[in-house]
Image (cartoon, grey):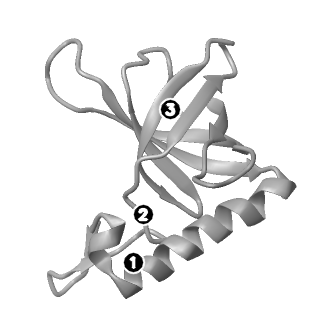
Amino acid sequence: MKRSKKGSFVERRSYIRIQTPLSLTYTTQDSDQVQNVITKDVSANGVRFESADKTIKITDTVEIKLLIPDAKNPVHAKGAVIWRNKISLEDAAPFDTGIEFVEIEEDNKNTFLKFLCDYLYKWGEDKTKCGK
């Protein structure tokens, strides 16, 4: 977040982040090795997850499969790694990784957006049911 002139913080994010664990698999353009992770949060334009994968780099393009609860098929998307932060100073510490969606397959967009809308609707009704 960045500071405004009066000292208050201004939110730079375009979309609300939903803190929910979803199964996600990804591969990078340089590797066919499938990495399995759990999301920390998702939004309409990206996802954040923790990974021990030391080969993934900022600007890498990744192929993603995101498992949405009750959906018949995973959401297939392409994304760009836009940030990575080591979780601690330990050598073996994993990284938090931020992916910005570049493309979501057309037949998956509705599934993904419906999930986000349903989640936000439930969160508005009862915040305790949505992990907040």
Q: What secondary structure is marked by label 3? A: loop
Q: In the rendered structure, find residue 41 and report the number of the disc placed on it.
A: none
Q: What secondary structure is marked by label 2? A: loop
Q: Identity of the amino acid at label 2?
A: Ile
Q: What secondary structure is marked by label 1? A: helix
Q: Determine the residue positioned at 75% across, 50% down.
A: 103
Q: Determine the residue positioned at 30% across, 77% down.
A: 127
Specify which label sits upstream in the sequence, 1 or 2: 2
Q: Is residue 58 visible?
A: yes
Residue situated in front as seen by the camera: 123 or 89: 123
The reply to whether callout 1 and callout 2 are in contact (CB within 8 Å) is yes
The reply to whether callout 3 and callout 2 are in contact (CB within 8 Å) is no
Q: How dense is the environment of label 1, judged by Cα within 10 Å: few (below 14), some, or many (20 and up)?
A: some
CA distance separating discs 3 and 2: 23 Å
* Left or right position of 60 against 106: left
Q: Report x, y in % for residue 107.
A: 85, 56
Q: Identity of the amino acid at label 3?
A: Ile
Specify which label sits upstream in the sequence, 3 or 2: 2
* Left or right position of 30 against 104: left
Residue topped by disc 1 = 123
The reply to whether callout 1 and callout 3 are in contact (CB within 8 Å) is no
Eye-nearest disc, 1 or 2: 1
Residue topped by disc 2 = 18
Q: Report x, y in % for residue 124.
A: 39, 85
Residue topped by disc 3 = 58
